[in-house]
Amino acid sequence: MAKKIVTSKSIKFLEKYLNNYSPTGFESEGQKLWLDYLKPYIDEHYVDTYGTAVGVINPKAKFKVVIEAHADEISWFVHYITKDGFIYLRRNGGSDHQIAPSKRVNIHTDKGIVPALFGWPAIHTRKGSSEKPPKTDNIFLDCGCKTKEEVEKLGVHVGCVVTYPDEFMILNKKYYVGRALDNRMGGFMIAEVARYLKENKIELPFGLYIVNAVQEEIGLRGAQMIAERIKPDVAVVTDVCHDTNTPMINKIEQGDIVGGKGPVLTYGPAVQNNLLKLIIDTAKKNKIPFQRLAASRSTGTDTDAFAYSNEGVASALISLPLRYMHTTVESAHKDDVENIIKLYIEVLQNIKNNHDFRYIK
């Protein structure tokens, strides 16, 4: 597999997909884009009650393999509107309060998008000895209104979701940059796997379920629901991990992971050892570079939801090294994206129908 898999057409989809809004609990528009791209490469598809989207190849096969990512991005909820028209928020997922001051945002209302910004006192008005850092209880939105009534007239109310408008870019021809690479980049990669299989007429002896789950950012909820519906035999999940080779990161705590040096394969209780060995052997055989990471009690990804569902599902995690996670400039190396797609394609061709991954037989 010498030539590049990701094409210029793929990048156009990726840009459109990343620039679209898909906050936790409100993923529908992003899921529509993803499904429209995926449909030519699958046999059927469906969407569950909460919005997890599934494309299926060989739907009649009894043995079922899942490849999965999650579709939701972090955001904020309108929580309190002051009489002076300022807006305080609650997190929807792991939104970073320290990056908020001076950021522009979109408030999503029934009347359309209302632009706003995170205000912050000018540096001239702050004293070093008593200067307060940004916290969830002191950051606020300003949408140019003087009263609560004026805010509400725009359509803004408690519960409205708030997202950042920052858009996709490519940095130094090497890095994909934008918000929500965690983990719509995963959705992009598994869609590219489906495209490659179809265009190269690669037939698999099992049912392949390409899953883009919702609500990962608030507790793996979408994966929990869809695992019970699909009842897979195998699940290989893709998510992001930290590229730890930037300033201010402790490698003793976070591990030594370098963007551009390949997919990251995780060791941990939820990762089934024989499936992990198959992935590692496949990477070595096909000369696909990879890195290793150790999890503690859980991976913190949808891998955990699949692994412990349905009396136990053989599950593994392939991670994309990511710089600046949960900011609006999340960055992933193009080579890692390419190599994760390649690894998925090769692994799927090494899984047999009725493959028995039991640790002790």
Image: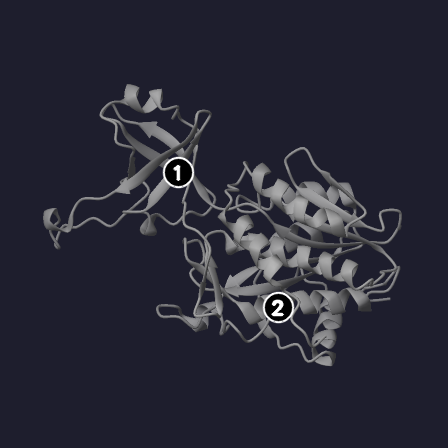
- Is label 2 in a helix, a strand or a loop? helix
Marks counted in the figure total 2
Disc 1 residue type (three-letter):
Asn
Which quadrant does the N terminus fall into? bottom right
Q: Position of residue 309 (x, y in %)?
A: 72, 48
Furthest toward the front, the residue is 8
Label 1 environment density (alpha carbons within 10 Å; few <14, some 14–19, many ≥20): some
Label 1, label 2: how far apart the Cα atoms are: 32 Å
Q: Position of residue 221 (x, y in %)?
A: 61, 42
Residue 280 lies, with reference to residue 92, above or below; the image says below
Residue 30 lies, with reference to residue 158, above or below; the image says below
* Residue beneath the point at 49% across and 51% down: 180
* Residue beneath the point at 63% across and 47% down: 34
Q: Are marks 1 and 2 in contact (CB under 8 Å)?
A: no
Judge by depth and name the residue closer to the eye, 5 or 266: 5
Q: Which residue is the site of mark 1?
A: 106
Disc 2 residue type (three-letter):
Glu
